[in-house]
Image (cartoon, grey):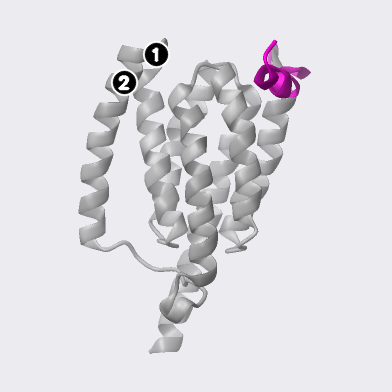
Amino acid sequence: MSLLDTILVPFHTPAITLAGAATSWGEIISFVTGALCVWLVAQQNVWNWPIGILNNLAFLALFFASGLYADGWLQVVYVTLAVYGWWSWLRGGRAHTTLPVGRTTRRQWSALFGAGVAATVLLTWVLVTWTDSTVPFSDAVTTVLSLLATWGQARKKLESWWLWITADVIYIPLYAYKELWLTAILYGIFLALCVLGLRNWRADLRTRARVAA
């Protein structure tokens, strides 16, 4: 057994049985850190970023064991984006101040749409050609949606919540199909938290608009 396999053993060790399927400690850790991270995002709490990094590392091990390779490598990108988001929330506003909630411009939407379509086509081809993924298109489209949403989250774009909601609606049946039941439940919780986050950020944006007027 390699050193990496030894390190990952706790993440694959069954902890409980849920809906007839063994649930690993890795999935439980991912559940707890993931739910806490999204709740902190909804509250605009900057501590979501370090908690999110822990969540990414837990999911990295979990997804590779489940054959969700795009979602696995996505966690590596998430860590990079988390570092950027952490800085952006603290120093990404005007004159390096705290970043406020904003709206996605038409130009940004056009760029996101073009990049999203191209990336989904490319990633689907990569998964079909180079891996044994059983859900290449679903894996690809959720990966791309999540990346676009994370960029929007890092820049505190209100519409990033709609991207997360779309991704979660696909993720829930995908993880159920893979018998990752706790993760499917987690993404159901994510969906509810995304609605909360959308409401909170929209209220904050409206409050600042009234103050500015």
Q: Is 77 placed above or below 106 here?
A: above
Secondary structure beneath dot 2 equals helix
Q: Is the residue marked by circle 1 packed among few (<14), some (14-19), or many (20+) residues within 10 Å?
A: some
Q: Is residue 140 left or right of residue 31?
A: left
Disc 2 crowd rating (10 Å Cα; few below 14, some 14-19, many 20+) is some
Q: Residue at x 40, y 43 (%)?
A: 147
Circle 1 SS class: loop
Q: Which residues are magenta?
A: 1-20
Q: Residue at x 43, y 27 (%)?
A: 70
Would residue 85 be found to the left or right of residue 13 on screen?
A: left
The percent coordinates of residue 88 (x first, y second) are 48, 64
Which residue has dot 1 on it?
131
The answer to whether mark 2 and mark 1 are in CB contact below 8 A is yes
Quadrant of the drawing holding the C terminus:
bottom left
Is 198 magenta? The answer is: no
Q: Is residue 11 visible?
A: no
Amino acid at circle 1? Thr
**Camera sees residue 90:** yes
Outermost right residue: 15
Q: Quadrant of residue 32?
A: top right
Query: In the picture shown, does residue 130 fall above or below 54?
Result: above
